[in-house]
Image (cartoon, rainbow, N blue to C red):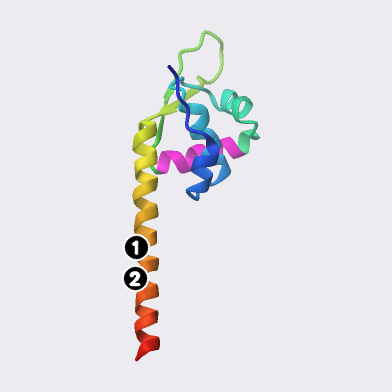
Amino acid sequence: MERTIPPDILSAAGEPNSVAQVISSLSNNQAQTVKQLSVNSNLPLSKVASGLKLCRNRGWVSSTQSQTRNKGRPQHLWRLHATPIEIITELEDETRSKLNLLSNAVEILQNELIQ
């Protein structure tokens, strides 16, 4: 059974829409070209490219060149490099870290107000 990560979960975790749509489209475990990702995510090619760049910087996606019979440049096939659970766990850890920082800041401010 194929499971995809809904883009709204990634958006709720603070990821840009381009990242959320790209990860959601790739989470079905099928490699896709930028053009296929654009069609599947309803994003313009430029947004897909920027989303892929952000995902690649986080280590979530990787690409390979496809063998083509046609003349011209080979196409890049993009796929998830991290599993959906690894991505969600990473986002959860980041959210917890942010929450801890905010909690500590509130505690410091409250202590300063009491003194």
Residue at 45%, 19% (x, y): give it: 2
Q: Amino acid at mark 1?
A: Asn
Residue at 40%, 53% (x, y): give it: 95
Is the residue 111 above or below the residue 72 in the image?
Answer: below
Q: Which mark is residue 109?
A: none
Examine the structure image and report whether residue 76 is included in the region drawn in magenta.
no
Is the residue 101 above or below the residue 43 in the image?
Answer: below
Going by the picture, which residue comes out furthest to the front? 114
Q: Which residues are magenta?
A: 47-57
Q: CA distance from mark 2 to mark 1?
A: 6 Å
Name the quadrant containing residue 60.
top left
Q: Nearer the viewer, residue 50 or 75?
A: 50
Q: What x and y, as percent, mark residue 87?
A: 38, 39
Q: How many marks?
A: 2
Name the quadrant containing residue 70.
top right
Residue at 43%, 22% (x, y): give it: 29
Residue 15 visible = no
Examine the structure image and report whether residue 56 is included in the region drawn in magenta.
yes
Q: Report if the CB atoms under discs 2 and 1 are less than 8 Å apart.
A: yes
Q: What x and y, as percent, mark residue 46?
A: 62, 38
Kindly state the secondary structure of the residue where label 2 is placed.
helix
Q: Where does label 1 land, which residue?
A: 100
Q: Where does label 2 land, which residue?
A: 104
Is the residue 14 above or below the residue 29 in the image?
Answer: below
Dot 2 alpha-carbon crowd within 10 angstroms: few under 14, some 14 to 19, many 20 or more: few
What quarter of the picture does the N terminus occupy? top left
Name the quadrant containing residue 100.
bottom left
Q: Nearer the viewer, residue 51 or 73?
A: 51
Kindly state the secondary structure of the residue where label 1 is placed.
helix
